[in-house]
Amino acid sequence: MATTKYSEAEFLIPGDRLLAHAIVGTAKNAAVNPDLARWSDGTLNRKPLIIYDINGQPLFYDFRIGRGDATFGYVRVAASRLLGSSVIASEMGERKWSFESAARKLSPKVKKEFAGAKVSAPRLVCYSYPKLGVQFDIDGPAGKQRAIFDVASLARVPEKGEDQSEGFVAWSFYDALSDDERKRRLARFKKVEGDVTGLTTRMSKAVLAARTVGAAVAVLNPVFRFRRTVTKLLQYCTHYGHTHARSHHCFVLHGQQVNDYCAVATCQMILCYYRYYYSQNDIAPALGYNAGGGCPPDQSPGYRSLTCNHLDSSFDA
């Protein structure tokens, strides 16, 4: 979607402010979330991994939190105020994919396929939010084009066609934001930004100088008055035994098992919440899944059929 106002480049967050958002956001989450208690001993890496939009503009910055060789998790920070929030996500544990490894494997393949053309250095991109990929820009006899590969599976990602609403296709997060949406997100970010701009100069310097997440929490506590949330979990889950490696309590993310199973995985999580246990391969045909094209916009009949009409579902465009 083309936009004439609020360009991405105009609202990129400066490097020093970006780091402050990362540290403050990480400290706030670690201070109140028991699941992130381990992060207190970790250090936030000052050299983040840049994730670009497929249109070429920086989209996210991923900061690693760890100690020595141990990785405790990652914090994803917005590159632009147009996103409306500073900290986009907190991720626990080590990752199962590596951008460096993917780029190393894909570069020779791309150069061979586009022999004689000028191939750019590989770039980590968000090609279909929140999916990540490796993008190469090619300038050759056929003109300028790009090649995008999923960072985990290394599968080639097709460009989004006009008739596609979802699936394993590449689309730009920024280009999907209308001017009205950008305006709303900028207004929302002003409120979020107060967590950083509201700090005194002395406190800001102390936060940036903090060696660990726990040290940053101690600096910020007089301002935010952190209170750790204490919860008790009542586990009621029959499709995994409590000793099973994947035992969980039905309130967790289920990754899509096929590249264009986004709607299928979403349906699995919703049904799991209501105690309907189906595999993603069982759910796909009920939603009208089409290989390579994802699911149709109206998936409500599938939800009803999979729950014997016990869930009331309707399509909202």
Image: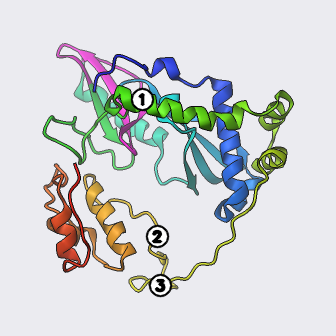
Q: Is residue 135 magenta?
A: yes
- Callout 1 touching callout 3 (CB < 8 Å): no
Q: Nearer the viewer, residue 40 or 288?
A: 288
Q: Nearer the viewer, residue 4 or 263?
A: 4
Residue 206 at x, y percent in the picture: 84, 35
Q: Is residue 208 above or below residue 97?
A: above
Q: Is residue 73 magenta?
A: no
Placement of the N terminus among the 4 image quadrants? top left
Query: What type is the residue that disc 2 sits on?
Result: Phe
* Residue 39, label in figure: none
Crowd band around label 3 with a 10 angstrom C-alpha radius: few (<14), some (14–19), many (20+)? few
Residue tagged 2: 251
Crowd band around label 2 with a 10 angstrom C-alpha radius: few (<14), some (14–19), many (20+)? few
- Callout 3 touching callout 2 (CB < 8 Å): no
Q: CA distance from mark 1 to mark 3?
A: 41 Å
Q: Is residue 116 above or below residue 172?
A: above
Query: What type is the residue that disc 3 sits on?
Result: Tyr
Predominant secondary structure, magenta span: strand
Residue 69 in view: no
Residue 200 at x, y percent in the picture: 82, 31
Crowd band around label 1 with a 10 angstrom C-alpha radius: few (<14), some (14–19), many (20+)? many
Q: Nearer the viewer, mark 1 or mark 3?
A: 1
* Residue 182, label in figure: 1
Magenta-tinted stretch: 116-145
* Residue pictured at 20% horizontal, 57% vertical: 315
Identify the element where label 2 is drawn: loop
Residue 107 located left or right of residue 315: right
Residue 88 in view: yes
Query: What type is the residue that disc 1 sits on?
Result: Arg
Residue tagged 3: 236
Of the image marks 1 and 3, the number of the one nearer the N terminus: 1
